[in-house]
Image: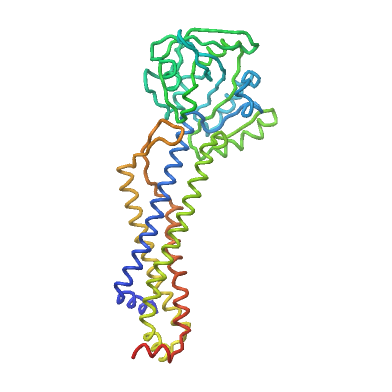
Amino acid sequence: MFKLALRNILRQKSRTAMTLAAIVFGVSGLILTGGFVADVLTQLGEATIHSQLGHVQVFKQGFYEKGSRSPEKYVIDDADQIARFAAKMPEADTVLQRIRFAGLLNNGKADWAIVGEGVEPDKENHLGTFVRITAGRQLKDEDTSGVLIGDGVAKALALEPGDTVTLIMNTADGALNTTELNVVGVFQSFSKDFDTRAVRIPIAAARELLARDGANSIVLLLHRTADTALVKDLLIPRLQSLGFDIRDWVELSDFYAKTVELYRTQFGVLQWIVLIMVLLSVFNTVNMSVFERVGEFGTLMALGNTRGYVFRLVMVENAMLGLFGAVVGVVLGTLAALAISEVGIPMPPPPNSNVAYTATVRVLPNTVLLAFGVGLIATLVAALLPAHRVSRTPIVDALRYNI
């Protein structure tokens, strides 16, 4: 049967070519679109992690919901102890502390409301590989009176590196405190809104201004993003009962979660479109091919072959077509993905961002297997009805097609 099926495929060259083209196009399209979407989501995730959030954050319960209004009420007094504990985890790369404050930044002519962070500069620079310095340089540990300002703050106050600004803020007890700072650099993170109000100063300076030790959040940067859920699950039973909230970067980034949902929905719709396209194309060519060969199948049944044999013969022919087309589609799709990745796809900045990026097409095993399965299964499903119809055609009626 397999030898006969192969001969039939090779005999119908035009029909075979049309069927294979539909399968190859569909499989290759799924690999390319799936790989592109995966790369966009991966780069978006890494940009979110390495510009601001890290992989996992620990803070007092209630800080995530209310801390932006009153950060002084959610200071972790034993932050050093928790940071040392987290740093001992083998999955952790860097553990850093942040303390948040709000205030006004004055350039001598105007005030600008800011949301500031006291950070550990060298550790922050290690985390913030997606933070782009547009002027000046990064903040360093030795910059005791230095300040790194967001791009939006710099534009609002017309500031440049080397300028002196006055930071006005309240201490934890409500008293007014001020200090003069030197602008060392201007940065752009992944979030345009964040850059509009953000300033960063060394954590020691922030604690002195607030007259309060500790930190509002402890940020864990891991060696691998894939370990995020594991580390979070290890921290929850040890810290949650002590009044701490542990959240990963996906929970902290509402924009990323909604973007993932959007892209996955779009890709799901695209998969169905490709599946239907392959089904209709293969069904059309298979149906025409089978109709032209009704007399041939009638002769086979007249010579003693069963209807089941004819049904299986048509299905085997299309299984071979589906298998070959899916393999060719996987090969061509993979080669096209690698070629596109070498060149890259220039992408504009995402919504609420200033930073453009270059996308690639990732070749993922799950996407390749899905595309292969869609190509093969769609071909088999498209052949079911024509195979059933021709196998149920009465022998006498089928033989008339030979006249």
Residue 19 in picture, x, y percent from top left: 36, 68
Residue 149 in picture, x, y percent from top left: 45, 19
The total of numbered circles placed on residues is 0
Residue 148 in picture, x, y percent from top left: 45, 18
The N terminus lies in quadrant: bottom left
In the rendered view, would you say 60 is above or below 223? above
Residue 186 in picture, x, y percent from top left: 41, 20
> Residue 82 falls in which quadrant of the image?
top right
The C terminus lies in quadrant: bottom left
Q: Residue at x 42, y 18 (%)?
A: 154
In the rendered view, would you say 318 is above or below 217? below
> Residue 217 falls in which quadrant of the image?
top right
Colour scheme in use: rainbow
Closest to the observer, 168 or 89:
168
Closest to the observer, 23 or 208:
23
Looking at the image, residue 359 sits to the left or right of residue 207; the answer is: left
Closest to the observer, 291 or 147:
291
Looking at the image, residue 147 sits to the left or right of residue 62; the answer is: left
Looking at the image, residue 175 sits to the left or right of residue 145; the answer is: right
**Farthest residue in the front direction?**
109
> Residue 47 falls in which quadrant of the image?
top left
